[in-house]
Amino acid sequence: MTTSVGSVKGTNGYPPLSGGAIPTPTLHFSRCSLKDVSQFIKTHHYSHTHPGGISHAFRLDMDGVLSGACVFGYMAGNPLGQVVLRNFCDDPSFYRELMRLVLLDEVPYNSETRFVAWCLRWLRDNTDMLAIVSFADPKFGHSGTIYHAGNWVYTGLQKEDRPRLIIDGKEIHPRQCLNKFKTSSVPKLVAAGHRVQQQRREPKHRFVFLLRPDLQPYLKYPRQQKPEKTL
């Protein structure tokens, strides 16, 4: 893997970056539709899926080949959970969650941070959004390295959620369980003939990116000390 990024083409305001004397790949950033990157995410993300409610999708092409995807949307089951400002705006339509970020190992060093920065700049310049929230899952050894590098605000661990439900061998979120089975009660699910297991859901690290600097006083979560990096 190279350690520098070559010229970057795409949206105005994303200038070329010199790769020096050593030839480096050409990266192209653009907004796209979810269908353009859906299969890429399902193939390369460790979850092999992506949630619903995605409103904005972006792609990163390296030398003309799809090599990265980043998607934003409404927090599953509870859009109010993405409202990260107090006494300013309680409308969840002004907030989003960064739901998936996937890049191939072949992309140049530090491309993750640059790619996310381009996405955030596009959202800032082209939408009325106020803030983005994202989570790093310790279960998979993630502590938010790219968010530290991108100057996101670390606000600590989220509240511990209900246990993971493994129903008939497939994990399903309790809120999705309500939609699908009309109940998330383990006894009722078992009585209905389902095989159910429960696993503790470890709280995730929460990060916030404010799309306007004047919003700092309204952040409803206090800044926390950054967690130890585990990647």
Image (cartoon, grey):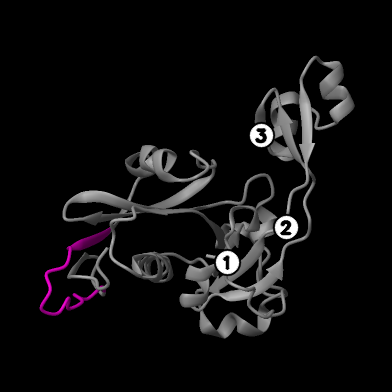
Which amino acid is tagged 3? Glu
Name the mark on residue 230.
Answer: 1
User: Percent position (x, y) of residue 221?
Assistant: 71, 74
User: Percent position (x, y) of residue 212?
Assistant: 51, 79
Q: Are marks 1 and 2 in contact (CB under 8 Å)?
A: no
In the rendered structure, which disc, 1 or 3, sits on the residue that comes first in sequence? Answer: 3
- Disc tally is 3
- Mark 1 to mark 2 CA distance (whole Å): 16 Å
Residue, disc 2: 203
Structural crowding at the residue carrying mark 1, measured as other residues with C-alpha within 10 Å and reported as few (<14), some (14–19) or many (≥20): few
Q: In which quarter of the image is residue 202?
A: bottom right
- Name the foreground residue: 223 vs 102: 102
Magenta-colored segment: predominant secondary structure:
loop
Which amino acid is tagged 1? Thr
User: Percent position (x, y) of residue 113?
Assistant: 40, 69
Residue 220 showing in the rendered view: yes
Magenta segment: 14-29
Residue, disc 3: 171
